[in-house]
Image (cartoon, rainbow, N blue to C red):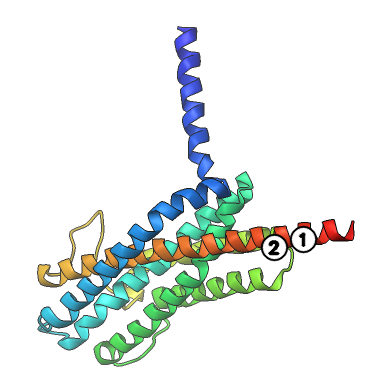
Amino acid sequence: MSGARRSANSEAMSENRSLWRYANPAEFMRVSGVILPWAAGAALVLLLGGAAWGLFFVPPDYRQGETVRIMYVHVPAAMMAINIYFIMAVASAVGLIRRHHVSFLVAKAAAPIGAGLTLAAIVTGAIWGQPTWGTWWVWDPKLTSILIMLFFYLGYIGLWAAVDDPEKAADLSGVLCLTGVVFAFLSRYAVEIFGDQTLHQPASLSLDAETNVADVFYWPLLVTIAGFYAFFIALVLLRARTEIRLRRARALKLRRAAMETA
């Protein structure tokens, strides 16, 4: 029995170590190099297909008319903006606890993408809100939380740029990212938490509830969302790989300079 238990523990530890091997820059470069072209190709096909389907082949909504087409940008952008922040928070926590530098680099690579999508969600929401609500902006809990989340995105990016020491920048930005998780959470669940205090409807797509989007709009929306995810994966891998290469080049330059002065 003891031998079987030791064997099981050994296998579990081996699997655990195998999961963390992707935090090694060399292993990350190898695996991401395989995934990147597939993700980029999928993003191209899904985004073009979803955009064409939603913009040109879906009929106008009987209530919203042509403005319903904004959904094919607004919903994926808002969904991704929140999810990317959660991804950054997890990566930052792993970096702070396990001291895996690749985790910090993934969070850093994701931040500008998340900030851009948050801004896109706010702008497209305003364009949709003006004819629907009669105003470009209201200070309801969901919109306010998303705006504050954008400020955390920008603060995170600015902190990386302002601190010269990469180690210190990673730690400080990681702590800032984790601090802002509460606003990502509120952005996701504001309707459920605040109820009638927000003008927003419940989530259009949900894993634990029936969708409130008609099939004619649902399927092209699903394709577009998949395209946004593939685009994010491709872009974050590309940015992280570029950052690793830049750090390697910087380290090599410093090593050569040290050898010359010696």
Answer few, some or many: residues within 10 Å of disc 2's Cα (few below 14, many 20 plus, some between 14 and 19): few
Residue 166 image position (x, y, % from top left):
69, 61
Q: Which residue is mark 2?
A: 250
- Residue at 35% x, 75% y: name it: 198
Residue type at mark 2: give it. Answer: Arg
Residue 51 higher or lower than 205, as above or below: below
Residue type at mark 1: give it. Answer: Leu
Answer few, some or many: residues within 10 Å of disc 1's Cα (few below 14, many 20 plus, some between 14 and 19): few
Residue 38 position by quadrant: bottom left
For residue 73, which numbered disc appears in the image?
none
Disc 2 versus disc 1: distance between alpha carbons?
6 Å
- Residue at 17% x, 87% y: name it: 66
* Left/right of residue 165 with respect to residue 185 in the rendered view: right
Q: Which residue is mark 1?
A: 254
Residue 32 image position (x, y, % from top left):
45, 53
- Residue at 49% x, 8% y: name it: 2
* Relative depth, front residue between 201 and 30: 30
Q: Quick one: which residue is furthest to the front in this view?
A: 260
